Amino acid sequence: MSRLRLVCSALLLAVSGPVFADAASHAAQAERFLELTRADKLAVPVYAQVQQMFAQRFAQAQAPADKQALLESYQVKADAALNRAIGWDKLEPDMIKLYTSTFSESELQELMAFYQSPIGRKVLEKMPVLAAQSVQISQSRLQAAVPEVNRLLEEMSAELDKQKP
């Protein structure tokens, strides 16, 4: 019986070696893809937005210019908080899992080939700007609907209030 266990264990070890190698290779492809697509820069707009929030609050408080160092110290603290939450070292393992669960190793290789082509490089260069402009377009169009949505919310609240016993 123990000989059978030994043989089974050896067989499992022999078979699992390539599986672990494949998983490591797949993860390495995902990591290379994320590097190529500069995924580590995805959070940059969040950092900028937080910096802008602090600057706006500083301006709203009508803080004197000699308090600029205070603003900057809080911006540094905010960056540190963001780094702890969404720094690339925190995101990368999850991003690798996400990409390896979504794309096969060969698909990642095809994607990398595309992004290394001239049109792929152009997509990488232009997509952040296009995405930001798309958000701006959507937000500006959304602003037109906000008053009506707020009015509808008020109407619904009024109707609900009427129905209370």
Image (tube, rainbow, N blue to C red):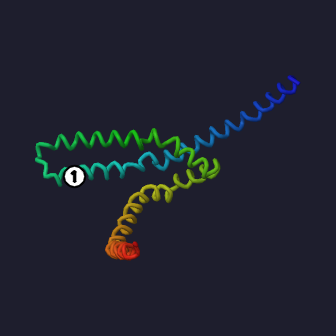
Q: What percent of the width, then of the height, locates residue 136? A: 35, 65
Nearer to us in this view, 125 or 164: 164
Q: Which residue is mark 1?
A: 57
Q: What percent of the width, then of the height, locates residue 120? A: 50, 57
Residue extending furthest toward the front: 165
Nearer to us in this view, 138 or 116: 138
Residue under the point 28% across and 49% down: 51
Q: What percent of the width, then of the height, locates residue 59? A: 17, 53
Crowding around mark 1 (Cα neighbors within 10 Å: few <14, some 14 to 19, many 20+) is few
Residue under the point 36% across and 76% down: 155
Q: Dividing the picture into quarters, in which one does residue 29 lie?
A: top right
Location of residue 71 with respect to 165 vertically, above or below: above
Q: Viewed as shown, does residue 116 lie left or right of 63?
A: right
Q: Viewed as shown, does residue 74 lie left or right of 25?
A: left
Query: Looking at the figure, which quarter contains the C terminus?
Result: bottom left
Location of residue 101 with respect to 89 vertically, above or below: below
Q: Is residue 11 visible?
A: yes
Query: Looking at the figure, which quarter contains the N terminus?
Result: top right
Q: How many marks?
A: 1
Residue extending furthest toward the right: 1
Q: Dividing the picture into quarters, in which one does residue 152 lie?
A: bottom left
Residue extending furthest toward the top: 2
Q: What percent of the width, then of the height, locates residue 58? A: 19, 50
Q: Amino acid at mark 1?
A: Arg
Task: Say what secondary structure mark 1 lies in.
Answer: helix
Q: Is residue 145 visible?
A: no
Q: Viewed as shown, does residue 20 lie left or right of 39?
A: right
Q: Dividing the picture into quarters, in which one does residue 96 lie?
A: top right
